[in-house]
Image (cartoon, grey):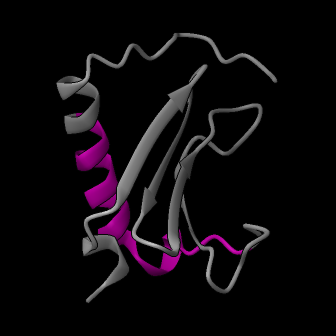
Amino acid sequence: EAPWTMPRNHMMELLGKRAYRAGHSLKFVHMPPPYGNGEWQIFDLETDLGESTDLAGDFPELVNRIEDTWSQYADDNNVISPDWVSGY
């Protein structure tokens, strides 16, 4: 079974930064500028725990899927995305 189809998924948003853990190994991260590139990034934590290799370019269909999944999650859970990004 593919990791992104496994039932243990977790989404979060904090001060404009978003993350989605899919299964045991995949992590999707969206960090707006100036802290990130403003695009969804994909990391395989099983082989890249330091999140140094973005796989989004290799899996554009997953990027499209996470964009749709995030939008649905945000709507279902009344997520309020700020119009500014706070640092830590």
Side (left or right) of 14 relative to 4: right
What x and y, as percent, mark residue 81?
A: 44, 17
- Identify the residue shown where x is 53% and y is 62%: 27
- Identify the residue shown where x is 19% and y is 37%: 72
- Identify the residue shown where x is 27% and y is 16%: 78
Q: Is residue 82 highlighted in magenta? A: no
On the image, which quarter does residue 51 sit in? bottom right
Q: If the image is split into quadrants, where does the N terminus sit?
A: bottom left
Side (left or right) of 27 relative to 8: right
Vertical relation: 24 (above or below) 10: below
What x and y, as percent, mark residue 75?
A: 20, 25
Q: Which residues are magenta?
A: 53-71
On the image, which quarter does residue 5 sit in? bottom left
Side (left or right) of 81 relative to 3: right
Side (left or right) of 11 relative to 47: left
Q: Residue 49 versus residue 7: which sits nearer the camera?
A: 7
What count of labels does the image hold? Answer: 0
What x and y, as percent, mark residue 23?
A: 40, 70
What x and y, as percent, mark residue 40?
A: 50, 52
Vertical relation: 27 (above or below) 38: below
Q: Is residue 65 highlighted in magenta? A: yes
Vertical relation: 80 (above or below) 67: above
On the image, which quarter does residue 14 sit in? top right
